[in-house]
Image (cartoon, rainbow, N blue to C red):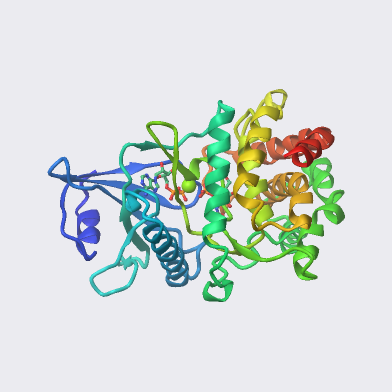
Amino acid sequence: MNNPLFRELVSNFDINLTIKEIAAYGTGHINDTYLVKTIPEEAPDYMLQRKNHKIFKNVPGMMKNIVITTDHIRRKLIAEGVAEVDRKVMTYIAAKDGQMFVNDAEGNYWTLFQFIADCRVVENIQRPEQAFRAARAFGHFQQQLADLSGEMLIETIPNFHNGISRLNDFKLSISQDIAERVNENQLLINKILDRSTEMTALQRGLNDKTLPLRITHNDTKINNILFDQDNNALCIIDLDTVMPGSALYDFGDAIRTLGNKAPEDEPDLEKIVFNQEIYEAFTQGYLSEAKTFLTKAEIDQLPFSCRYMAWEQAMRFFTDYLNGDTYYKTDYEGHNLVRTKAQIRYLEVLEENRAVMEGIVNKS
Ligand code: ADP
Ligand code: GN1
Ligand code: MG
């Protein structure tokens, strides 16, 4: 892909580079990512990313959040004398006009950041040791941001993990029934609604301050960590949703992908099985970093947070399905319904494993 548009976009950033080629990259549901390969071979490569401004309605504000948090982490790494800082925190490049993005003629927002070479992402963790490392990295990320005031950051997507507001959106999509998909899915809808009181407790806890608001990542899917060749968790990526939130979101969302032996859109519900070993390793890794700042109330709610994030994600996929598939990228007709069913099944699996999960947190 050597579209002149891409070259033109890159030339608007404040960096000297010679492009070899630009190619589509990654499997995200929201943004479009391209790898910008440069010459000579040993020069650093970059990633050009179109931020989805229909979803991220305030891209300048979002980029400000990213700059504040990455600068904060970078300062800490330098103070600690850590080697190869640019491989441990993301580096976004400013545009020539000083903004952190470039607009194209259609009003899209493009960003450029350093490609961290010799790394890989995993979609599915097999080894407990790797889950332990991933968890330590997410815990460390939260810890690095623990002394940054949340007031510096905007709420990139308002009410992003707010269960009360997500539930209202879901109910609205049911009452509007735009795509006429409600009738045939009533049983599934009830599975979400039946759990409303239990699940909205997390937001009530934040509202009445029994749970603290921190700066969190808010999209801790396992493919948002870069591992180096020795399987060390090197860098947390995909910082679009870094904003004030609950530590429980990050723990629960990681287990949403990691604790499930099947992918989030597994059509065969029999394959959705709880991975206890991985859950245990993740819990230990996370607490090894996070026990220094988590409150008792948060630690007690870790197992619940996994059920909460599965419920919330099921509801988000379901809302999108009922609205006619306008939010998530889909690969086929009915993909959002398949995702919904898989997340609901996973939630049931977590419910079946509740005592085991609580035992592991107590032990850790
Ligand atoms: P999305 O929001 O679409 O998930 P990401 O920001 O996670 O987008 O990027 C998509 C993929 O690009 C990642 O899964 C990862 O493979 C790769 N990637 C992202 N940032 C970097 C980086 N700084 N260095 C190397 N690879 C990266
Ligand atoms: C989206 O873009 P991606 O794949 O990292 C979504 C997450 C969901 C996830 C489900 C901004 O993340 O919240 O958990 O899909 N991001 C946004 O796979 O909505
Ligand atoms: Mg990602």
Q: In terms of depth relative to the viewer, which is nearer, 226 or 133?
A: 133
Q: Percent from the top left, x then y, of residue 298?
A: 74, 55
Quarter of the image for the C terminus: give it: top right
Relative side of 71 to 336, left or right: left
Relative side of 18 to 250, left or right: left
Q: Is residue 44 above or below residue 60?
A: above
> Is residue 124 among the parts visible in the rendering?
no
Q: Percent from the top left, x then y, of residue 336?
A: 62, 42
The answer to which quarter of the image holds residue 262 is: top right
Quarter of the image for the N terminus: give it: top left
Q: In terms of depth relative to the viewer, which is nearer, 362 or 270?
A: 362
The answer to which quarter of the image holds residue 98 is: bottom left
Q: Percent from the top left, x then y, of residue 328?
A: 55, 49
Relative side of 170 to 134, left or right: right
> Is residue 196 among the parts visible in the rendering?
yes
Q: How many marks?
A: 0
Q: Percent from the top left, x then y, of residue 106?
A: 34, 65
Residue at the image point whose x is 71% and y is 29% from the top: 274
Residue at the image point whose x is 67% and y is 47% from the top: 252
Residue at the image point whose x is 16% and y is 59% from the top: 16
